[in-house]
Image (cartoon, rainbow, N blue to C red):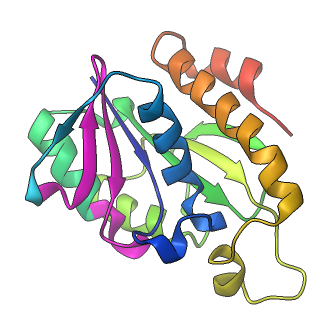
Amino acid sequence: MFLIAGLGNPGEKYKNTRHNIGFLVIDEITKNTDTSTINNSNFKSITKKSKDAILAKPQTFMNLSGESILSIADYYGIDNNEIIIIHDDLDLPFGSVKFKIGGGHGGHNGLRSIDGHIGQDYIRIRIGIGKPTNKEVADYVLSDFNKEELNKLEDIISHVVKAIEAIKKETLAKVQSIFTLK
């Protein structure tokens, strides 16, 4: 059983922001997958279950995402090598997609929180959002995608969903060689 969590912030205000790209991927997966809703307040998450995965959108706000991930992983006995975290990455150009296990948080507060709760050795899907040119980082990640980015987003999200399906069946090295976008 995999735990697939998309990082983001709860609420309509943040729905289409760069920081919420993880939520957008989870929304796409659940739109096309037979799932049932899990109601467990300890998870602090919108949580659904499919035949082979727990799908989560932590509702703790980004900086406390680790609380939700730990609670779900502990409850279901999911090891770190079966935890997939989908998140935005400022250090990658918009539309890039990279995969790795472990590493630092790179200043990403959601990853910092997860690392503090479960350690660093989980699967990360990094989706590039680019760097701000004239905004503070916090303002940039909490701003909506522009029209050009929105036009490309559907293809990027679809690509990531296919990669997640491959991660369930293949080695990460194989997934990296097939699904990495630069």
For the C terminus, the image quarter is top right
Q: Nearer the viewer, residue 163 or 32?
A: 32
* Residue that appears at 45% across and 66% down: 110
* Residue that appears at 74% across and 65% down: 145
Check if residue 92 falls in the magenta segment: no
Q: Nearer the viewer, residue 152 or 68?
A: 152
Check if residue 54 falls in the magenta segment: yes
Instruction: Give the answer, above or below, for where 172 lies relative to 93.
Output: above
Instruction: Give the answer, above or below, for where 161 lies relative to 157.
Output: above
Horizontally, residue 76 falls left or right of residue 89, namely left
**Horizontal and vertical percent for residue 128?**
75, 53
Horizontally, residue 30 falls left or right of residue 108, namely left
The part of the chain drawn in magenta is 42-66
Question: Quarter-wise, where is residue 137 in the image?
Answer: bottom right
**Horizontal and vertical percent for residue 181?**
81, 35
Horizontally, residue 44 falls left or right of residue 85, namely left
Asked whether residue 93 appears in the rendered view, the answer is no
**Horizontal and vertical percent for residue 98?**
70, 39
* Residue that appears at 63% across and 36% down: 99
For the N terminus, the image quarter is top left
Q: Nearer the viewer, residue 7 or 180?
A: 7
Instruction: Give the answer, above or below, for where 139 lies relative to 15.
Output: below
**Horizontal and vertical percent for residue 161?**
58, 29
The residue most toward the top is 169
